[in-house]
Amino acid sequence: MIHVENLTKYYDRFCAVDQISIDINKGEIVGLLGPNGAGKTTTLKMLTGYFKPSAGAIRVNEYTIDDHPLEIKRMIGYLPETSPFYKDMLVYDYLEYVSKIKGVKPSDRLPRLRYLADLCGLNQIMHKTLGELSKGLNQRVGMAHAMMNDPDILILDEPTQGLDPNQIVEIRNIIKKIGQEKTVIFSTHILSEAEATCDRIVIINRGKIVADGRTEDLKQAAGKKTIIQISLLHTSADAAQKTLSAIDGIESVDIVTQTDDGMVTVKAHSSGTVDLREKIYKTIKATDWTMVEFLQEAKTLETIFRDLTRQMN
């Protein structure tokens, strides 16, 4: 449905998006993950036609963004990170206004408003002004705005940012409902939300795609890498890092914490299928250190994300 090839965006000499290529199928819920400045928002704005790419191609079905920008925009509903609302308008008046702008037929406007009010949970606030709503309720109105013309594709930029846990769950449920019928692409910093909501996850860092796949596939691909967390007494962070780094098979050792009472916590990273726990234990046993924690981490989306984005920093 969506084909992106070598998509690139420069701001003067700075490359914000660097030759991204991706295909997104109809009905997928795709999460775009990445640290601040990774290029997520710029990518979404190029997909919506808001930004013109410096190079590369975007095609939605048979349309290209260069030759048919209006046709593509009609197929997309977009919720930016900050929704541009008229704060003094009632929710009902605002959505009715949006329906006119979006070209909804007069006879279809009321049924459409009722449908979106049910879908986004707006029935109890239609008489309130946008300015008196919480951020979570504003996000719901924004989603109704984006869905007003019944687009095939919904693009959401950080839809859960700044929301409390209850509001995050509500937005997640709305996205899942919409995803049953539409293609949904959304960016997020909240890894648990992406894992719980998305069919597929794309991790982007410094303008490049560094991972693309279903959560379980990403975990399997990263399964050969191991992280072991160790907490020690009677040593220094530098000594622990130097000693453990010398063990054959360990790629790196990160210092996690060093407390006032003398406890040092480190994480040892290794790759390959060899279990290094025995080597690490014997190395520590040969010292006068006291080991108070020894934990091998399971691969989660968070650890995969950290590994992939740290490698390029």
Image: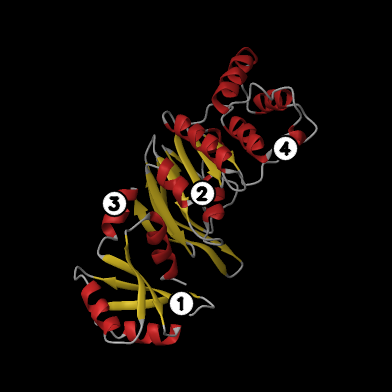
- Looking at the image, is mark 3 or mark 4 nearer the viewer? 3
- Amino acid type, label 2: Ser
The residue identified by callout 4 is 85
Nearest to N terminus: mark 4 or mark 2: 4
Q: Nearer the viewer, mark 1 or mark 2?
A: 1
Q: Position of residue 88 (x, y in %)?
A: 80, 32
Residues under numbered marks 1 and 3 in contact, where contact means CB atoms less than 8 Å apart: no
Please report whichever mark, 3 or 4, sits nearer to the chain's N-terminal start.
4
User: What residue do we see at 30% from left, 55% from top?
Assistant: 219
**Three-letter amino acid code of the residue under disc 3:** Asp
Rounded to the nearest whole Å, what is the CA distance between mark 1 and mark 3? 36 Å
Q: Residues within 10 Å of mark 1 (few under 14, many from 20)?
A: some
Q: Is residue 24 above or below residue 244?
A: above
- State how far apart marks 4 and 2 are (Cα): 21 Å
- The residue labelled by disc 3 is 217
In this rendering, the answer to whether 307 lies above or below 20 is: below
